[in-house]
Amino acid sequence: MKKLLFLCAAFALSITVFSQARFGIKGGANFANQKIKLSLMGQDFDRTGDGIISFHLGGVAEIPFASNFTFRPELLLSEKGMNFEDEDDNGDPIEAKIRPYYLEVPLNVVYTHEFPTGLRFYGGAGPSIAYGLFGKAKNGDIEEDAFQDEGFKRFDFGINILAGVELNSGLTLGVNFTPGFANIVESDDPGGFGADVKWTNSVLGVSVGYMFGHRQQ
């Protein structure tokens, strides 16, 4: 009997929570880059590429769970990558263009505050999980799949920090910063030189969106 009552209460609570949920869309620009850290013979070398302007596009949900707090998951197609210029051992130029595309799922806990004018501020953070879908790595005339067997790992992970405003109309303007923590390449001597490599993504995003439905007061 207790189990039945618990299940009924949980079902009723879930109906109440999701009846207050709102959904929306967003899209905008990514200012993406990648960082490479190389450890070789006891020495550490860091190199950051040249940033690129890319994009993100997808959906947003807003699920209230406490006064002024909401759970804000997102599902985005996000382009990351960098440009990289250097020289190889023969002095020949390396001009790499790396463009991986990810399915990104930021899981944000957000604080909201509505001003008397109706303008609503939100800000928060949470983990961000990404899975590589497709992409290219190009060096001169050579173009390869970014996620081939000897390329990037498909899994990426970081933290997403976001802030923005929502107007009375439902229009949203936001910014987010997502530094990656996961190493997206094989770290155990990938080139056969006794080196250890860590390669990470980072993205600064600026977005415009629209939220459907009425805001909870």
Image: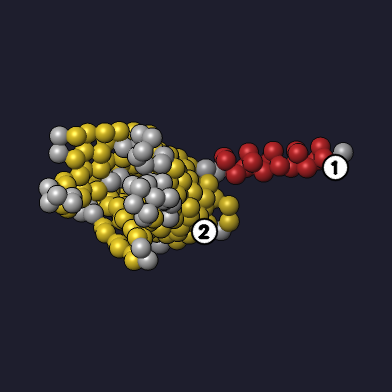
Disc on res. 2: 1
- Image location of residue 56, percent across then percent down: 31, 42
Considering depth in this image, is 87 or 125 the residue closer to the camera? 87
Q: Which residue is drawn at 85% across and 42% down?
A: 2
Secondary structure, mark 2, is loop
Q: Mark 2 is on which residue type?
A: Asn
- Image location of residue 74, percent across then percent down: 44, 43
Secondary structure, mark 1, is helix
* Left or right relative to 70: residue 207: left
Where is the N terminus found, in terms of image quarters?
Answer: top right
**Do we see residue 134 in this rendering?**
yes
Color theme of the render? secondary structure
Disc on res. 124: none
- Image location of residue 29, percent across then percent down: 26, 47
Q: Mark 1 is on which residue type?
A: Lys
Considering depth in this image, is 107 or 132 the residue closer to the camera? 132
**Do we see residue 120 in this rendering?**
no
Toward which corner of the image does residue 6 lie, by quadrant? top right
Q: Is residue 154 above or below residue 159?
A: above
Toward which corner of the image does residue 165 lie, by quadrant? bottom left
Count of numbered marks: 2
Considering depth in this image, is 167 or 26 the residue closer to the camera? 26
How far apart are labels 2 and 1 at the CA level? 32 Å
Q: Which residue is drawn at 64% across and 41% down?
A: 14
- Crowd class of label 1 (few under 14; some 14 to 19; many from 20; radius 10 Å): few
Q: Residue at x 24, y 48 (%)?
A: 82
- Crowd class of label 2 (few under 14; some 14 to 19; many from 20; radius 10 Å): some
Mark 2 vs mark 1, foreground winner is 1
Q: Residue at x 23, y 54 (%)?
A: 49
Q: Which of marks 2 and 1 is nearer the N terminus?
A: 1
Disc on res. 68: 2
